[in-house]
Image (cartoon, rainbow, N blue to C red):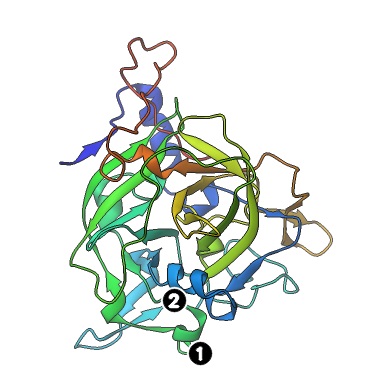
Amino acid sequence: MKKIVTLSTSLSLLALVGLSNLTFAATPKVVYGEDNRVFVEDTTNELFKKLAHSTAVQIKSNKIKSLDDDGQFYSINPEKLKDSFINACEDESYSDVVNAGNCSGFLVGEDLLVTAGHCVRSESACHDGVWAFNYESSVLGDGHVLPAADVYKCKEIVNQSLSHVSKNDFALIRLDRKVKGREALKVRTSGRVSIGTELVVIGHPSGLPKIVADGAQVRDDQNDFFFKANLDTFGGNSGSAVFNAETGVVEGILVRGERDYYLDQEAGCNRVYKCEDDGCRGEDVTRITVIPELAPGMTPVEPEAPGFGNGVGVIPFFGM
């Protein structure tokens, strides 16, 4: 049964119009302490490699096309990080790598995928593009080509929340067919994560091929809908699974955080924004237990919207 938070005020509609053309840049992230990002094929942790196998990237329709009449391969727009709107400085990590991704997601059922609510704001947005499980630097090669067998389309939004009040931000979507050769990830179904728990995030920062970033911890656990952590994440990581680094259980969904780049005035390009491990605002992670289909009875009650009475007319939260 589909459930989508609706917009019911003129203020909400104006906000939606003003932000409708933004991509993952609207949800900035950052590097905390050492930069722990590595391509999935370069990690030495076998658990992380297994978890990464069930992680996907959202690629919008204008960035991907069928390469042949048989539809066996897809061609990716070969724009690099330094040449994209991000305008990364050439000496920054990954500046010379293709960044066609928009958001991240992960498999929780045979044909069910979780991502951030702001990544699929509507059914039309859900259908605009594909989800690729094999968007990895070792697969792409110099030709920027993906085998179609692991590329899926959105069939429908099963459930979604995008709230300005609670800042709840998630989407559960159904893919166009069952995913072959990949396991649904284990998710937390009760309780809550503890302060100091070691975390790892797997996804597509700045739209890059699949990247693993560990060495993070839970910093703040006060909110019922999300927790904060010092994860090395960027726009494009929105929708990434955040795992307990020891058990591999999904604790939440990366949705928003600190700015990810700053302008180097002298160089005329953007550099990665860096913070101390215990500095800056931290990255917000929607608790996986807020999704009723995955953790029945665990979803917190949405608080009343100030000025609207009885919580009616929830304003969408855009991850700023």
Residue 55 in percent (x, y) is at: 41, 66
Q: Which residue in the rendered view is the most extreme toward the left?
A: 1
Residue at x 76%, y 56% (from the top left corner)? 33
- Asked if residue 94 lies left or right of residue 316, the reply is right
The amino acid marked with disc number 1 is Asp
Decide which of tag 1 and tag 2 comes sooner along the chain: 2
> Compared with residue 263, is residue 1 higher up or lower down, i.e. above or below?
above
Label 2 amino acid? Asn
Compared with 128, 301 (above or below) is: above
Relative to the observer, which residue lies in front, 314 or 282? 282
For disc 2, the neighbor class at 10 Å (few under 14, some 14 to 19, many from 20) is: some
- Mark linked to residue 77: 2
Q: Label 1: which residue?
A: 142
Residue neighbourhood size for the residue with mark 1, other residues' Cα within 10 Å, grouped as few (<14), some (14–19), many (≥20):
few
Q: Determine which quarter of the picture holds residue 300.
A: top left
x 40%, y 19%: residue: 303
Element class at badge 1: loop
Residue occupying the point 31% across, 68% down: 183
Name which residue lies at 56% across and 67% down.
212
Disc 2 is placed on an element classified as loop
